[in-house]
Image (cartoon, rainbow, N blue to C red):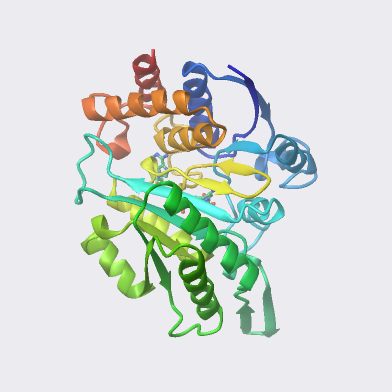
Amino acid sequence: MAKHTIVLIPGDGIGPEVTSATQRVVEAAGLSVEWVVLPAGATAIEQGFDNVLPERTLAAIKAHKIALKGPVTTPVGKGFRSVNVQLRQKLNLYAAVRPVRNLPGLKTRFENVDMVIVRENTEGLYSGIENEVVPGVVTSLKVASEAACTRISRYAFRYATKRHRKKITVFHKANIMKLSDGLFLDCARKIHDEEYPNIDYEEVIIDAGCMRLVQNPERMDVLLMENLYGDLISDLCAGLVGGLGVVPGANIGDDAAIFEAVHGSAPDIAGKGIANPLACIMSGVMMLNHIHEEAAAAKIKSAYDAVLADGTVLTRDLGGSAGTKEFTEALISKIA
Ligand code: NAD
């Protein structure tokens, strides 16, 4: 088996706990990896770098093209600009892909949920263009470009076709944001009509879409949306299938990809050894598929499906009492 070089950003909060669990699981599946461990966020400053997103970290991802990342805390209302947003913009990781599905043995309010959120990852309200017009009046600019809306739409339709998915639903608010969300819809519609008429296509105003999600999530297939909507809807959908501990993610560009769970640094449970590493491990499985290590990916997937179905070793967020290490070891023993 070829040796892979993968950049590892442990992040902070529960990041180091869940990424080290993922390293162990990936290696247990037989993958030979050289991990290039580099910091981002407050950890980078603590380690003596002069920037929350050190040039060395960026350069390593550009060079090796693949990274596994733990969550990074972003200060609220002040402080440095989100490292996640910077990474996605600087590396042009334009597609966030987040599969949300019911897992074996995990009882939730819904059954047969199996959808994928495709979120535009580089613009919208995350462009970071904010101004104080006069004291007491501020603006945040929502940016939509034809190039980015077309690129993410084409990605979603190509993904749906490859994965034998049937339908793309675009969530939007073009009744209010007629220009920006209107452009998003025009681009998605054009890609559907001209390039992928094989996939069913529908447009849903996002407020009604939220209701549909919590009434009949099993009817959704691929959801396509701009940046902020994708962020919010991802957490909502995580709640449908067992929470943030079980939803993985990938940030994909043409030249690099970063794999990370949807969840954040969970400061409330950091350092306690109780975080669920599964979302990060599942992101690792997406990473293995991306680098064409499908056999190792399948091994890990059937191992966690078996641990979940067995139900005796579950972390607390899933109703069990196991810690991060215990769950990881149960998973590794199933791989073995
Ligand atoms: P969060 O996802 O960190 O936590 C929300 C809730 O879910 C908490 O109660 C937490 O304990 C629980 N939770 C999350 N992941 C879990 C896991 N693996 N196992 C068990 N429980 C888990 O969201 P937040 O509290 O809003 O954000 C905390 C920080 O993380 C913020 O600074 C935010 O900016 C950052 N963040 C980073 C990323 C990223 O780096 N990709 C993503 C989202 C949020």
| Quadrant for the N terminus in the image | top right
* In this picture, residue 290 sits left or right of residue 43: left
Q: Which residue lies furthest to the bottom in this view?
A: 134
* In this picture, residue 224 sits left or right of residue 126: left
Q: Residue furthest top?
A: 336
Q: Position of residue 94 (x, y in %)?
A: 60, 56
> What residue is rendered at 26% in x and 31% in y?
320
* In this picture, residue 113 sits left or right of residue 244: left
> What residue is rendered at 31% in x and 39% in y?
317
Q: Could you say which is closer to the camera, residue 58 or residue 5?
A: 5
Residue 25 in view (yes/no): yes
Q: 50 above or below 64?
A: below
Numbered marks: total: 0
Identify the image quadrant of residue 256: top right
Q: Where is residue 190 in the image (x, y as percent from the top left)?
A: 51, 72
| Quadrant for the C terminus in the image | top left
Identify the image quadrant of residue 330: top left
Residue 145 in view (yes/no): no
Q: 226 above or below 304?
A: below
Identify the image quadrant of residue 311: top left
Q: 142 above or below 241?
A: below
Q: Where is residue 220 in the image (x, y as percent from the top left)?
A: 30, 59
Q: Position of residue 156 (x, y in %)?
A: 48, 57
Q: Could you say which is closer to the camera, residue 315 or residue 180?
A: 180
